[in-house]
Amino acid sequence: MYAILDIETTGGQFNEEGITEIAIYKFDGHEIVDQFISLVNPEIPIQPFVVKLTGINNEMLRAAPKFFEVAKRIIEMTNDAVIVAHNASFDYRILRTEFRRLGYDFQAKTLCTVELAKKLMPEQPSHSLGKLVRALGIPMADRHRANGDAMATVKLFKMLLDKDLEKTIVKDFIKLEVEKGIAPKLLGIIQSLPSRTGVYYIHNEKGKLIYIGKSRNIKKRLNQHFTGTTNKCKKIQTEVFTVTYDETGSELVALLKESEAIKINKPMYNRAQRKSIFQFALYDEKDENGYLNLKLQKADGRKKEITSFASTQEAKNALFRITAHYQLCQKYTGLYQTKKECFQYKIKECDGACIGKILPEEYNKRVHEFITKNSFENHNMILIDRGRNSGEHSAVLIENGIYKGFAFYDLNYQITNIEILKNILIPMQNNRDTRNIIQAYIRKSKTLKVLKF
């Protein structure tokens, strides 16, 4: 659990400042589960420059509760949680100072989003909260007020969690759980998981990742792991200490994120996604009469493929759909072997390219339409899909035919140019696995929106 907070103060001499406003959001790594927002009477005057910056003046605070009156609620919000703040050392120092005045030794673990942003977003010219939220398209209200800055920090922290592909933030959190002796049982783990689309990470007691998977229903999939009788399931059941997860909303993002996470973390119970997993590829070849034929063959890295498949059955199923959608001929897509007309022509579902009734130029246009849609070569496009909630979309960026990564963006802040998308992008490896994942998803998805630029 994380306590994401922001504090406004009176200003003044070091360690003599008083709190004027505090906002705390309790965040479980996925959503806000509790919140506390309050003005605080510091019992000392506010510096004039602070009044100008925050808009909080002495008159506003006369009827506000004093710190000792909100101290218990602050402890409730931060207990058993890691404190997260933008410049966490300042907020933590102020809290410790206020509690020390009450004779209480306040202690907590902290995470600083300035330091995390410098590590995970080194390309950003500034890591101040105001400039970061503008660059990343994070909606922000009430700048320099505790509530506005704390909510912006929540949204920034969610992005940093997404960009933390090596899961160092989560690993530190699991170490904290181990220190406290929390060892959840399998049933307890299952109850804490959502029935939503995403990627899940199974950790052992040392915080090490032992298995990564994706599912459209995380809870159901983990239940299968924990009740399975295979050797792998039994090993996972024995070694699991806790499970973390990333909701994605989009199955495409889940597939891409799973593929990348396996390659980076190499969990012991995952078989790494090998290039040879896509053993069959589709090629185009012009016959002696000038018609473009689609040929399903064993993948050959020396030849330029249109797309590829994990099995012949998957390929044939896809070819039937492609043939019907683009009004192609089963003879020329390899689905019906004959020297005469195809079967579809006999039942009047083919317009006769197989017997020369349609000229090669007209038929080949349909084949090129299919190739253009399914080949990434030199393409620039954004694939828009579901987000993690109703107020969000996901975006997958392909630039010059190369998969660049994905991002989530708030619907209140529309992506108006490619540079904003690049700022919030979670960079990913471009490889054969990712290309085939994207191509397969484009073929079957009904929710995907493709924007070309």
Image (cartoon, rainbow, N blue to C red):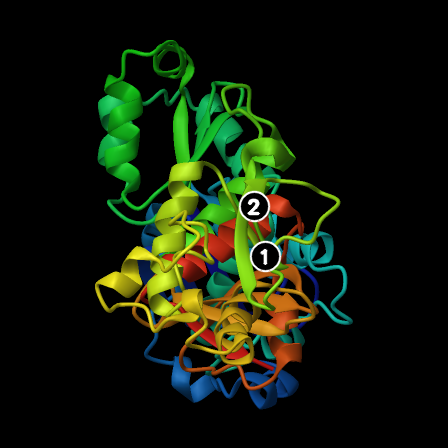
**Tag 1, which secondary structure?**
loop
Q: Quadrant of residue 416?
A: bottom right
Image coords of residue 23 (percent x, y): 42, 65
Residue to which mark 1 is pinned: 306
As drawn, is 242 to the left or to the right of 217?
A: right
Residue to which mark 2 is pinned: 281
Instruction: Classify the position of the C terminus by image quarter.
Output: bottom right
Q: Residue at 40% across / 14% down in the picture?
A: 232
- For residue 96, say whether it is visible: no
**Tag 2, which secondary structure?**
strand
Q: Residue at 38% across / 38% down in the picture?
A: 313
Q: Residue 249 carries which label?
A: none
- For residue 229, say whether it is visible: yes
2 and 1 marks in contact (CB < 8 Å):
yes
Q: How packed is label 2: few (under 14 Cα within 10 Å), some, or many (20 or more)?
A: many
**Label 2 vs 1, first from the N-terminus:** 2
Q: Residue at 60% across / 60% down in the picture?
A: 287
